[in-house]
Amino acid sequence: MAGLSVGKAINRLEGRAKVTGAAKYAGEYNVPDLLYGYVVNSRITKGKIRSIDTTKAKAFDGVVEVFTHENRPKLAWLKLKYKDIDAPSGSALKPLHDAEIKFSGQPIALVVAKDYETARYAATLVSVQYEAEPFETCLETNLDKARDQKNAPKPTGHFEKAYEKSPVKVSAEYLHSTEHHNPIELFATTTIYEGEGKLTIYDKTQWTINNQVYVANVFGLHFKDVRVLAPFVGGAFGSGLRPQYQLFLCVLAALHLKRNVRVTLDRHQMFPFSHRPPTYQKTRFSANNDGKITAMNHIAVSETSEYEDKIEEVVSWSHRLYPAPNTLFQHKLAPLNVHTPLDMRAPGASTAMHAIECTMDALAYKLNMDPLDFRLINYSENDPAEDKPFTSKELKQCYEKAAEKFGWRNRNPVPGSMQHGNKLIGYGMATGIWDAEQYPSRVEAILNKEGRLEIHNATTDIGTGTFTVMTQIAADELGLLPEDVIFSYGDSKNPFSASQGGSSTTASTGVAVVMAVKALKAKLLKKARAISNSRLKKLEDDEISFADGNIILKTDDAPLISFREIIAANKGKEIKTTNLGKPHFLKLRKYSKATHSAAFVEVEIDRDLKTINVTRAVTAVAAGKIINPKTARSQILGAMVWSISKALREETILDENLGKYMNPNLGEYHIPVHADIHDLEVIFADEKDEVINELGVKGVGEIGMIAMPAAITNAIFHATGRRINKLPIHFDALM
Amino acid sequence: MEVPVNKFDYQQAANTHEASVLVTGNDRANFIAGGTNLIDLWKYNVTNPALLVDINRIKENKTIEEIEGGGIRLGALVSNADTAYHPLIEQRYPLLSSAILAGASGQIRNMASNGGNLMQRTRCYYFYDAEVPCNKRHPGSGCPAISGYNRMHAILGHSEHCIAVFPSDMCVALAALEAVVNVSDANGTRSIPFEDFHRLPESTPEVDNTLKHGEFITSIDLPSNGFSSNYAYLKIRDRNSYAFALVSVATGLALDGDMIREARIALGGVAHKPWRVKAAEDALRGKPVTETSFEQAADLMLEGAQGFKYNRFKIALAKRAIIRNCMMSLHPELQKPGAQP
């Protein structure tokens, strides 16, 4: 009999396909007569294209066409509605629209040729004359040009007065570098021209429907004629939330040439691109001598482009954790000559919580208190910002379990007091918080002729385990084994799903799966009861259940009727239903929803050379019910590695004189290597949530990298007595 | 800058002499062995060979063998990996093994040849970006690194024209070991002392070394003294593997009890060539093996060092690294792969 699959650490269902190379990605669909596009990117940062000469490129053997702003098709289908669903306010980039250059590397031409190598070579033959203008790309020198945003929470109490009066206070400034998502899979689009106005598009995306809508809007096509598929996505981390420029260029070429076209970007072409914005932050926190926080002020200034105002949630987080009676928050945007930033794992929160939790650590030291005790003194069961209870909050359990596992209480609080040979040892901790979002999602559930359950939804699986987890949820709901469930996803033709962003998919599509399968069960029951002499007619709904392809009697598990018999009675036809899963808006209005985490970190720092290693880390996460402990653990492990990266390694280096990124490759864009990663441990707190949704799930992913960068920074302070507030921390900052 | 049509000829050389003859007179001809750097440079439009002479089929220069006088000859076409793990090298020149294994990745070391290691070009961001000026790539166009992001750049021996550094780890050990580079061309052979092989940028940073056009590295000779009793290689970088050195140090000591009989110290990641200062090594002769002795040597090695906006830390770091590495060389048993300083 099919047991419960939810809660079991089953292997990723597509794992074999991925490791054997059978899994195909957007740039790997080989269709007949495929043409290849290669993008030409701007060499200047701001200004105009004075002239662009494509004669030589066009004359090169094998080149089919070169698209620029001068010959861009002005056909009826080009409707120029460029705003995708995830676009921030402003006007989205219009590739090849005119001669204007707004950032270094802006796409200015697409060379289409019979093969990739020809297109790439011919791209070097496109000759461009520019009229360069002065530009601004550096956040630090443009802080004064930042514009205030309205998204910050309203002030409470009187911050300045309270801060002034408080006996213990800390003020600090933080600066974070630009980061690029850099998924291993290169951004690529393969567009199959299916005839007049009809396209099938394989694209690297986290939101098939967003790109379907975008293509239909921009090119004036019918939604139903544009199908976007992303069956496998080789990492995205937010970069796939909005259409990237290769999609536009690929579709433009396919429609104009009426041919199948593929555009794959090089790694360096993924740098004039969406990214995590560099951010400056300033905090001022104060407390009474008993450790109670009295006032919190958090100001953030982040970069955006000159044409869109991308704004993250940065300054709101401290007040969702700590009940300070006086708060003052401000968020500003500095428009610079760069492409628009985009959400990147734990957008806003990983930035904010670094500043907040480092400030908390400094305040704990000023109070002469253990940093964990200081958090516990300011622990709030309710969300202080909203003055509402959380649907669940097991942060205290996270603190306790992780501290115990880590051995936090063995810590000597005096900075520099713990040493091992010529290494300084530091212990640091920090708190994490992230939204527990759920969005409406529609699922079609089908009992097919073979008695197997098919589930259809447009969501992607960007490597998070969605395919596996949805299969588990569906299997349990209908009493089947996971192998009797077929989950179809990554296809805009399937019923609606929101983006795979913000760790929301398990709740959003998971609940929709439950709703659809429940509806399917009702339908099956109705059909079963309609069969003459059915024993089910005499039984109430609560007397029966579903297991192993049968409707059974709950009392003795005796099969009453098999799914096959129901299908047979249905004249051999499949039985299906489509249903919406959505949050319980009214009920949830009384609650605040969040996942929480606690991170504890040990660093070793060379006494003389100052080189830093994270030797141990424990992260405990409270995220409701964990559907699959294995895929969930992998999400948190990945986020912990990324935390090490964010704190110590990763940055896009901008040359402010040239206005361009100088390390656009994985050799020089340093992400951790195996030798950087030591003992990492993940703990899931036992968090029962009967309010949040039918499944009691919140989602994991982002929450793993919100606490740990601050914990690393705090551990470095503990080891050395030095607070380095610029990320990533270069070891030489300690010299 | 327009890139000429990307057509190139490819020839396989049967022997060293033929390889030299094939490239003679063609200033856009390149030898290719492992190709671990040339292919990158080509893809980035930094270089654009018209003729590629593949030297992998050459039967010569593919062994590691003992030579007269007690030294070892490393064939130019032996891979970095095979060199590092060769029993003769592991036993007699463990400093060289350590240095090679600190560089690149396993895959790259399998492909890269010993001759090619010497011929690597700088990893300066600005050199690699064909869209920006660079005196090494386009003489006279300027050096944006001087006023730009120069964390990885030189603190010693740089010029107003170029502040790039030579990226090899292997060559830092070869410099300390006083290796000799054997080269040949169509007219004959010559031997170049290691310190004369790479050069400083001065006003011609486009020239990395003293190899003449058509000359071909056939082998590298290691003198008999491999300093296998007291040696250490320390590489400090922005991540623990697969990153170029910010500062690296190769040390070999010959001791009489607690006194230094002979010292060799070379620095990587700080100049356009592996950096050695004879005066510093001479000053250690007859000194006790103490931090103070090594500190004095470090000061001599770093005399005249000048940093830029983002790499001034290298001066202090190099000093501490020299002292640490010399102290480490007293405990070679700790110099196993993966050992932490």
Image (spheres, coloured by chain):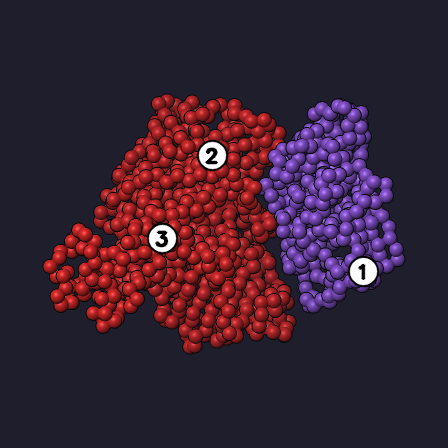
Inspect the image, locate mark 2, and give the three-letter code of the amino acid beneath it. Val
Label 2 environment density (alpha carbons within 10 Å; few <14, some 14–19, many ≥20): many
The type of residue carrying mark 1 is Asn
Q: Chain of mark 3?
A: A
Q: Chain of mark 2?
A: A
Chain B representation colour: purple
- x, y (%) of residue A347? 42, 47
**Residue drawn at (41%, 24%), measured in percent from left and top?**
A369
Q: Nearer the viewer, residue A275 or B59?
A: B59
Which is more toward the observer, A565 or A412? A565
Q: Is the C terminus of chain A in the top left, top right, bottom left or bottom right quadrant?
A: top right
Residue at the far left: name it: A538
Instruction: Determine the image quadrant of residue A393.
Output: top left
Residue that carries the numbered disc 3 in the rendered image: A469
Q: Nearer the viewer, residue B336 or B268?
A: B336
Q: Where residue A532 sits: x, y (%)?
A: 13, 68
Q: CA distance from mark 3 to mark 1?
A: 61 Å
Does the rendering let one see residue A673?
yes
Could you tell which of marks 2 and 3 lies nearer the N-terminus? 3
Can you see residue A214?
Answer: no
Q: CA distance from mark 2 to mark 1?
A: 58 Å
Disc 2 target residue: A601
Q: Are marks 2 and 3 on the same chain?
A: yes
Spatial CA distance of label 2 from label 3 is 30 Å
Task: Label 2: state its secondary structure.
Answer: strand
Density class for disc 3 (Cα within 10 Å; few <14, some 14-19, many ≥20) is: many
Specify whether disc 3 shares its chain with disc 1.
no
Q: Label the red chain with its letter.
A: A
Q: Callout 3, which amino acid? A: Val
- Left or right of B310? Residue A574 is left
Q: Which residue is mark 1?
A: B15
